[in-house]
Amino acid sequence: MIPSQVDETLPELAPFVHAVQGRRPDDGTWCEAWTVRDVLVHQTGNAEELARVLKAFLAGSPVQTRGFEREDPYRRMSDSDLWAAFMDRCAQLTEIAAAAAQDLSADTEVMWTGRSVKVPFFAEHMREELILHRWDLTGDDRTAVQALNEPWMTEHSVVSVGRPLLERGRTGLGLGPGERVEGRLRTPGADDVVVTADAGGTSIRLAAPEGPATIESDPAVRVLLLWGRRPADPSRWHSDAGPETLRRVRALLGGY
């Protein structure tokens, strides 16, 4: 059973737990390089690192965010120990997020992976990770689509995560001097997500709809595209941009 405080802070935990428990650890996922066990390892490392960085800041001794080497100890655990560690790290994150919310202003800025984020980011980012990686397990079921459709998922992806989502794609494009890629991802009734890349870097922002869209879709598909995922049903997105523009924009949307 998930403790009530954890469930209130991370309401997406229970659906994620049910999705994991309904599969074998060695089952494949929509994240092509990962099994279910790999997803759980990643999520355990996420919860630990979010808690570690926020706890250190709260104690007045900020630390640098570690890379994915933080996952290595969990890869060596048995399945039962890994499961216990995952639940424990989610509980720890909940406890530290509550302490930070009590002791710090919501506008307090904390460094995370080389950028400045605000205190609510830490619990919210774990929520996003639970939604996104649950989709990796289940695909486009009703729970996944409803969660991905939430406006805060788009805002968090663009504003709180931002450029790291595009860096792998930009590198893969091998853009030379003077080359530039720009795309507008549109969902009716909402701001566009505008992504750009050139040899010097990337940008991602929300902007009022203007001109033709590169890709138009429902908001759930747009979040998946930003994270380098693809919906099972490709008819959920539409484009008049032409094959070359579409290829380059989709290549840019490489996710982590």
Image (cartoon, rainbow, N blue to C red):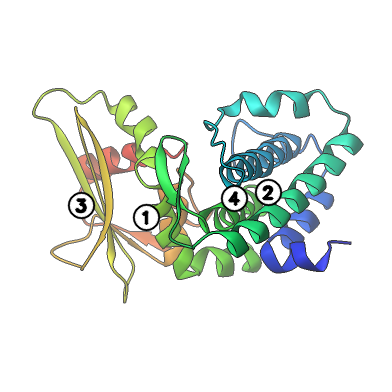
Sequence order check: which comes first, mark 3 or mark 2?
2
Sequence order check: which comes first, mark 4 or mark 1?
4
How much space separates mark 3 and mark 4, taking CA atoms? Answer: 31 Å
Callout count: 4
User: Does dot 1 land on a helix, a strand or a loop?
Assistant: helix
Q: Is residue 102 left or right of residue 180?
A: right
Q: Nearer the viewer, mark 4 or mark 1?
A: 1
Sequence order check: which comes first, mark 3 or mark 4?
4
Q: Is residue 126 left or right of residue 236?
A: right
Q: Amino acid at mark 3?
A: Ala
Q: Residue at x 47, y 52 (%)?
A: 224
Q: Is the Cβ of the residue at disc 3 closer than 8 Å to that at disc 4?
A: no
In this rendering, does residue 235 appear at all?
no
Q: Residue at x 81, y 46 (%)?
A: 88
Sequence order check: which comes first, mark 1 or mark 2?
2
**Can you tell which mark lies on residue 137?**
2
Q: Residue furthest bottom?
A: 189
Image coordinates of residue 103 in percent, x first then y, are 59, 60
Residue matched to label 4 = 129
How much space separates mark 3 and mark 2, taking CA atoms? Answer: 31 Å
Residue matched to label 1 = 159
